[in-house]
Image (spheres, coloured by chain):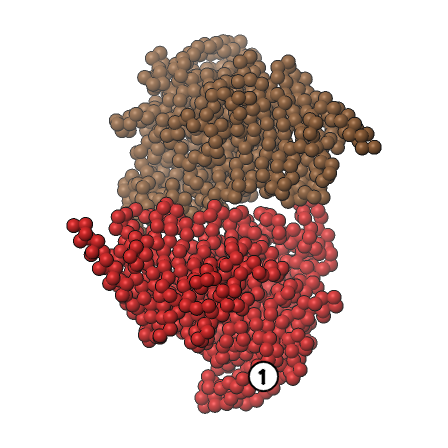
Chain colours: A red, B brown
Amino acid sequence: MKKFQILALLFLVSIVNAQKVQSPSKSLTVNFGLDNEGKPNYSVTLKDKKVVNQSFLGLKLKDGTDFTKGFTVENSNTSTFDEVWKPVLGEQSSIRNNYNEFVINLIQKKSEKRLTIVFRVYDEGVAFRYEFPKQKDLNYFIVKEEKTEFNLAGNHKTFWIPGDFDSQEYVYNETLLSEIDNEKLDLNNGIGVKSIPGKYAVQSPLMMKSSDGLYINIFEAATVNYPVMHLELNPKTFGLTSILAPNAIGDKAYLQTPCVTPWRTIMVSDDARTIVSSKMTLNLNEPSKIEDTSWIKPMKYVGVWWEMHVGKSTWDYAGSQNAQNTETRELIASGKHGATTENTKRYIDFAAKHGFDGVLVEGWNVGWEDWFGNWKEDVFDFVTPYPDFDLKAVNDYAKSKGVKMIMHHETSGSVANYERHLDRAMNLMKQYGYPAVKSGYVGKIIPRGEFHDGQTMVNHFNFVAKRMADNKLMVNSHESTRPTGYHRTYPNYIAAEAARGNEFNAWSNGNPPMHETILPFTRLLGGPMDYTPGIFEIKMSAYDKTKKEQVHTTLAKQLALYVTMYSPLQMAADLPENYEKYPDAFQFIKDVAADWQDSKYLEAEPGDYLTVARKDKKSERWFLGAITDENARTSEIKLDFLSPNKKYKAVIYQDGKTADWEKNPINYEIKTMTVTSKSKLKLVLAKGGGTAISFEPIN
Amino acid sequence: MKKFQILALLFLVSIVNAQKVQSPSKSLTVNFGLDNEGKPNYSVTLKDKKVVNQSFLGLKLKDGTDFTKGFTVENSNTSTFDEVWKPVLGEQSSIRNNYNEFVINLIQKKSEKRLTIVFRVYDEGVAFRYEFPKQKDLNYFIVKEEKTEFNLAGNHKTFWIPGDFDSQEYVYNETLLSEIDNEKLDLNNGIGVKSIPGKYAVQSPLMMKSSDGLYINIFEAATVNYPVMHLELNPKTFGLTSILAPNAIGDKAYLQTPCVTPWRTIMVSDDARTIVSSKMTLNLNEPSKIEDTSWIKPMKYVGVWWEMHVGKSTWDYAGSQNAQNTETRELIASGKHGATTENTKRYIDFAAKHGFDGVLVEGWNVGWEDWFGNWKEDVFDFVTPYPDFDLKAVNDYAKSKGVKMIMHHETSGSVANYERHLDRAMNLMKQYGYPAVKSGYVGKIIPRGEFHDGQTMVNHFNFVAKRMADNKLMVNSHESTRPTGYHRTYPNYIAAEAARGNEFNAWSNGNPPMHETILPFTRLLGGPMDYTPGIFEIKMSAYDKTKKEQVHTTLAKQLALYVTMYSPLQMAADLPENYEKYPDAFQFIKDVAADWQDSKYLEAEPGDYLTVARKDKKSERWFLGAITDENARTSEIKLDFLSPNKKYKAVIYQDGKTADWEKNPINYEIKTMTVTSKSKLKLVLAKGGGTAISFEPIN
């Protein structure tokens, strides 16, 4: 009898080993199986090319449950899904979600413990996740480790940053997989808090290119109530294994059945444009939980912000960020405080004059004298302005000018403190009519021992999004976990930083010219980024002759970023006086839309270049952005995305003849011409340069 | 030259070694000194008896700073303090704070790091604390360990409970110091979460009695922004060393100079009454930070509570505390839910009829189906009532009857969740006019890895007290850290549980008869306890014949507890129907005051007996409570505390002739007589019995 059981088992396994699921177009294939030890595994093939070799799946729980082996298949099921939905804000007004789904219900016969693995196979990629069904002997449980493998088929070129539980604000490295090594990095990079778990740890989204021309991206979607997934490389086998950010006592996730993990995704295509334009991450998230979304709006804004980065003014009233004890010292105005009523009014005037929706003010509230780097719990109270910032006067003035103020909540990583004050902070916002908040998480996290990427913090960011939604407020979080498409579910979570933003150019080694050609293939796959482009005064020596820092692009490329870096929240980050020096170039920032009917990725190569055209959601206008890395670039593009039978006035903002990000970054020229959908345009980009174009229909 | 310096140093040390500070009456002496290695140390003598032998002092910081040795005295200073202050609520209307203070400013010469030790010597005890002055090389720092010793002079009789970072809800053990051993304890004691760091760890207040008749108590006062101090015994030397409750990553306290630790106290007297009546702990706390205290009032209350403990009804709507997933199951009324509108109105009627100030309702809000034991983060929202509890109707009804409702916030230890909801929870209280809240912390703490006794939680309890004060609300915390007199500073923190309360008698091995004779020498030294006395239906078999649990006192002793267990918040904990069975005995609970002009401790012996008389703050009435342990007791007391030249009607509620806590606990008798300050009264207490007396002036 026993023998018979074993035979039956082997028979079942062999059936499962043969299971194959294909994408709607049949281009992409996933093979799922159990090996002789009952270990679940999968592989991925694009047409005839192996993308992921046999890779094992599973998790280990703290109670000793080993969900990596000993499984048999209880049953399985395939189905097809195809729908079109409309995002509140986005790159296109409607999104198709089309995949074949394969659900495998696994059981460990002895203990009767069950685990389900669900695959969704899209034409541009594969997603899978673990599901824990409600079951007799598994209710509350703790994930000790997730053991998800992605065994890549070759030693691909890779765009990587270190796996770091506290920061993603790194410059990308472009090396072979086998050359990844965090110990070889120069970590003097302006990042305050770093927690790198090992030399081979890298972050997702991890963008790769195979020697035979496949673009492969490994990421996750819908990270909810679970830590961020990092990846550990085996540099010899090119295998990657999941690493979950731990909590203070080393646990990974506290869950209760029924529940699911985030989706693990492998995007793959022989066309880089397919990856960069994919909506798979968004599609894998749940639909909006906000019913009335009428108050969620795109915003272009200016703010009291860049002037602090360039050293013209300070966040704190006392004019220094080195003070160590606010308790026992008087606040003495240094005259360098940026967030004064008067200065804010200047920005409001500027915003009103040039049609910006909002004004952000950082440093408006007490606490900045001693806010960072000391793991201090009670820093900000989020409601008390400095004596030279008149909350009421500022907000009254903004209202009179038709401009919205954007609130700023720097938490300095003291999340416990922020959560204690959140309701009062939101009440203040509602009292004065602030529609949105920029939040910040610079510093080591409190509760102490937690990381930015742990389950606690993932839940915090999602909690804040929900609470803000309850109060009809929008959020833009800086130093948060990188988004994984959750803005589909909470569309008021309009943007995040969660990568190395433009600010690093002001005071660190900065972002090399290729940086913005990689972000759309990595960070932006998860959601909009508040990159804060639009810097016209490129070299910091303009502020202080001894400074060597600079933005690593031309001015024209700064314009192009408003199109290439998708976000419904876009800052014109430079100082008003700098825009006033170049009013013709500034016109593009004034004109460009922030919410789109459609987007066309015309040219794309990670680390090299990107050309995108987008159509305004509310008009027939199109905008185009083209950027390059440190190499000059010429290309010819067809304007066949434009509506046929229409004429357009194209205003082209391009690098000047002698433009060069390093030697002559501000050199630009503006041309106007009439074009149609049949026109072709030659784009000429300088080293570190770009082109921005607006297309306005003529009658 | 070098030699000369060393000589000078030795000379200085020898001076310091000779430093002696005495209490105002000179009965108590502290000797402070530095040994040859610059280690600070002290000893304590009462008259000619050694209380604490040479004991070392100091701390170790996480940055490597060793504040246990290498010190020299920079300077020192002595002063005398004497003032009288008036507590908002208390055992007496004014309190004298009289001590001699000795401040020693220590320096580690090489590093120029400074530590100050301050002694305050009272007639009934010594207090000292560490102070960290503002200094060049010490700003933010982390306490790795506090090394404070209390080397006792003998193998004293000790009333102890295990040092436990999560609970104080233990039965006291009465053994010699050398016999302390947590591994020998039966831990099947009804306590849900236990975290005992070692076999020799004990809690403070630690009450001892020496063989030559000294009563010694080791405790702490003003525990603010610092973890709770436990004690580790060396059973051979009778030395105790401080153990601080750690945080999730093992750190003890995050501090910034200038700052202070809590006071470490050693009370000592040859009269037990001196210890039990001491106001030293209160005196060591800062004066009230609440300016207008008019809204802080004593309260006697009844509540929907004991009926759940005895199993007559349930906290949860579905009638079980075993349900495991509220997400996916419907709430189905079991008919056993206690907190219904109808049942609450019954308690309101009862409170109104008998003159109680308030009605507590537990189980009014959703979440109780699955609230405890699973380290679940989002359990309660503190604002959503069960469908059968009409918040508005209940509060309207209470108002119409002149009764206040008492809010209940069970957090199940998920403090992160509570802090997120606190503002909304308080808003609800204000909306309906709740003046006070009972909070609960049953379960493992979240943020996970934290303990009830860590700095994080100490700060939480103090934060809630402050936030409640901001909103003119009073707090009574259960399963919190034990108080250390902080109700002087925040007098709205009117009571706490933080010890083994009467409830354990309903469903566990319970509290032995001596329990209530020890608490005033331990837990109550720190502040009022919501012990919830007044149980008339002593044996649980009244509810269910199979039950063997019982309250381990007579009924008369339950009455006496309203006087012996000081608290401005006193519950009449039993069911209305049980009080209605014994209206004559119930009269004492109706009559007894909860705030006092004066208190006289007439007889006291920890573990054996206690007799206390107190004068109502608002009238000339006196009340007396006398309790005994498992032994019957007879004593004669003088009524010389009564005002001379006045006659009083004394109503004496005493054990009946056959009363016995075990065999006949409800047997009582009530006598009335006329007495004066010259009268003597014979008290006759049964085994586990007590006597309660009210004295009402005649004319």
Query: What is the residue that sits farthest to the right in this orientation?
Result: B1
Count numbered badges in the picture: 1
Report the chain holding disc 1: A
Q: Is residue A112 above or below residue B313?
A: below
Say which of A659 and A456 sits in front.
A659
Q: Which residue is mark 1?
A: A684
Q: Is residue B486 above or below residue B663?
A: below
Counting from the top left corner in percent of width and height, residue B76 is at 74, 29
Counting from the top left corner in percent of width and height, residue A325 is at 67, 47
**Image quadrant in which you'd find residue B56:** top right
Q: Is residue B193 above or below residue A20?
A: above
Q: Is residue A119 left or right of residue A683?
A: left
Q: Is residue A28 above or below residue A452?
A: below
* Mark 1 secondary-structure assignment: strand
Counting from the top left corner in percent of width and height, residue A603 is at 49, 79
Q: Residue at x 27, y 42 (%)?
A: B334
Say which of A336 and A279 sits in front.
A279
Judge whether residue A313 can be spotted in this image. yes
Q: Residue at x 63, y 58 (%)?
A: A364
Query: What is the residue that sits farthest to the left in this orientation?
Result: A1
Q: Residues within 10 Å of mark 1 (few under 14, many from 20)?
A: many
Q: Residue at x 30, y 46 (%)?
A: A137
**Image quadrant in which you'd find residue B659:** top left
Q: Residue at x 69, y 63 (%)?
A: A311
Say which of A326 and A176 sits in front.
A176
Counting from the top left corner in percent of width and height, residue B196 is at 46, 33
Three-letter amino acid code at disc 1? Val
Say which of A424 and A23 sits in front.
A23
Q: Is residue A431 left or right of residue A217?
A: right
Judge whether residue A405 can be spotted in this image. no
